Image (cartoon, helix red, strand yellow):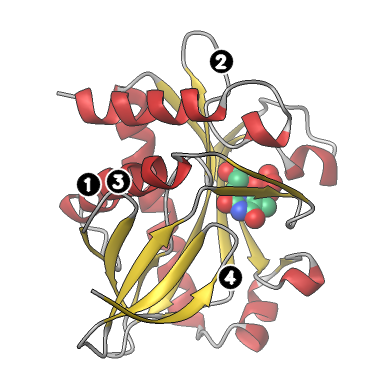
Amino acid sequence: MKAELLYEGKAKKVYRKEGTMDQLVLAYKNDATAFNGKKKASFSGKGRLNNAISAQIFPYLLENGVETHFIEKINETEQLVWQTEIIPLEVVVRNLAAGSITKRLAIEVKTPFDPPVLELFYKDDALNDPLINDQHAFVLCNVTEAELEEIKKTALKVNRVLSELFQSINLKLVDFKLEFGRLASGCIVLADEISPDTCRLWDLDTEEKMDKDVFREDIGDLLGVYNEILRRLEDRS
Ligand code: TMP
């Protein structure tokens, strides 16, 4: 099904789908990286788990009115998506203070944000993905004012939809990162992945961290918690 390798990122490989001009195969890798690639490891089975978790979440978003690049899961570690030109923007939404914001702005961990805090980062490894504002995004990311407004509106909608989904499986959606891509038609849709690599998820009862912070902070069994997230998603009624 795969034709040529177009791109290899830290967590996925991107192939063109054989015989098509507008569909891609995303192959999830077992690699985990943190701190802009400075910390690296491989977890046998992580690719399968993130593929399966993303393949639960994207259709759920579509059912709730969010357009995404996702077409279908095609095997254990791969999914088919519409080709997009990725907008070099990481859109982060935060419901509780954790991670970089607690250090950058000296905000106490677990401080609730209502309304949620939305931050834009310029996706550029060489610059260490700096925090940027809207005007920077117009210059650097080839988006118009109206498109950026739409991206932010969608990110906040994703937050509402996924906060409810995760609440239903006893998890707090603490924060997450989204990426958007432009289809050949010019329309912008949600792209990349949504998984415990790109979200912070805390158990509602125990506050146990059930996401990539387990690897970032060396505090437990990454495959065990990713498995548990998938089990809860699959078992939800
Ligand atoms: P941060 O607190 O490190 O800024 O991360 C905010 C959220 O974004 C968190 O859920 C993890 C996610 N994230 C990514 O998906 N990729 C990244 O490269 C970074 C830095 C964060």
Q: Give the residue displayed 63% in from the left and 74% down from the top.
A: 134
Task: Tell me how far mark 3 sits from mark 1, CA to CA.
Answer: 5 Å
| Of marks 3 and 4, the one in the foreground | 3
The residue indicated by pointer 2 is: 207
The residue indicated by pointer 3 is: 57
Q: Are marks 4 and 2 in contact (CB under 8 Å)?
A: no
Q: Give the residue displayed 55% in from the left and 29% down from the top.
A: 222
In the figure, 119 relative to 181: above or below? above
Q: Residue furthest top?
A: 205
List x then y, in percent, for residue 197.
Answer: 53, 44
Task: Tell me how far mark 4 sits from mark 2, CA to CA.
Answer: 30 Å
In the figure, 37 relative to 24: above or below? above
The amino acid on which the numbered mark 3 sits, given as a three-letter code, is Ile
Relative to residue 172, is residue 212 drawn left or right? right
Q: Is residue 174 visible?
A: yes
Q: Secondary structure at mark 2?
A: loop
Crowding at mark 3 (Cα within 10 Å: few <14, some 14-19, many 20+): some
The earlier-in-sequence mark between 1 and 2 is 1
Task: Tell me how far mark 1 sits from mark 4, CA to CA.
Answer: 23 Å
Q: Which numbered tag is attached to residue 89?
A: 4
In the figure, 220 relative to 119: above or below? above
The earlier-in-sequence mark between 3 and 2 is 3
Q: Which numbered tag is attached to residue 60?
A: 1
Task: Tell me how far mark 3 sits from mark 4, CA to CA.
Answer: 21 Å
Task: Tell me how far mark 3 sits from mark 2, CA to CA.
Answer: 22 Å
Of residues 138 and 229, which is closer to you in this image? 229
Q: Is residue 105 visible?
A: no
The amino acid on which the numbered mark 4 sits, given as a three-letter code, is Leu
Q: Are marks 3 and 2 in contact (CB under 8 Å)?
A: no
